[in-house]
Image (tube, rainbow, N blue to C red):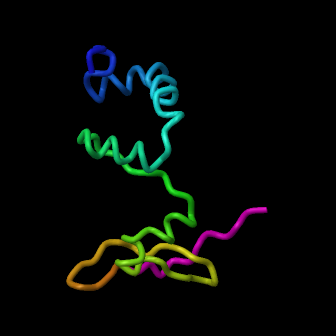
Amino acid sequence: ASDPRFATNPARVSHRDVLIPLLTRATLDWAKADLYEALEVAGVPAGPINTVAEVFADPQVLARGLQIVRDGLPGLASPIVIDGERMVSDRASPSRAG
């Protein structure tokens, strides 16, 4: 970054109020897949923000068997596997307020 306000992560955090609107304007007209590809080619760590439907259709989620149903609701299993065993939570989902 040629602007010293954005040269380091601490500087970007300090100037977030300026940076976020600049990034929003710069990326507004991009299709999500095109922006992700351009950032990947440029070596910028990034990832898409997916809808729930996109998450469940994601090839990695499908290949790793991460979609689960718990208490009748779709969800994601922990991606953490230790000694061949996937971590499992036995805690109940929080109740819905209201």
Return the residue found at the far right: 98
Q: Is residue 14 left or right of residue 32?
A: left
Dominant SS in magenta: loop
Residue 47 lies, in percent from the top left, at 38, 50
- Placement of 15 over or under 40, stated as above or below: above
Magenta span includes 97: yes
Q: Looking at the image, which residue is at 44% across and 68% down?
A: 58
Residue 18 lies, in percent from the top left, at 47, 19
- Placement of 50 over or under 66, stated as above or below: above
Count of numbered circles on the image: 0
Q: Looking at the image, which residue is at 61% across and 83% down?
A: 71
Q: Looking at the image, which residue is at 48% across and 51% down?
A: 49
Residue 97 lies, in percent from the top left, at 73, 63
The residue nearer to you, when weighing 77 against 41, is 41
Magenta span includes 64: no
Quarter location, residue 63: bottom left
Q: Is residue 64 left or right of residue 50?
A: left
Residue 69 lies, in percent from the top left, at 55, 82
The residue nearer to you, when weighing 93 against 81, is 81
Return the residue found at the far left: 83
Which quadrant holds the C terminus? bottom right
Which quadrant holds the N terminus? top left
In magenta, the rendered stretch is 88-98
- Placement of 97 over or under 18, stated as above or below: below
Quarter location, residue 35: top left
Quarter location, residue 43: top left
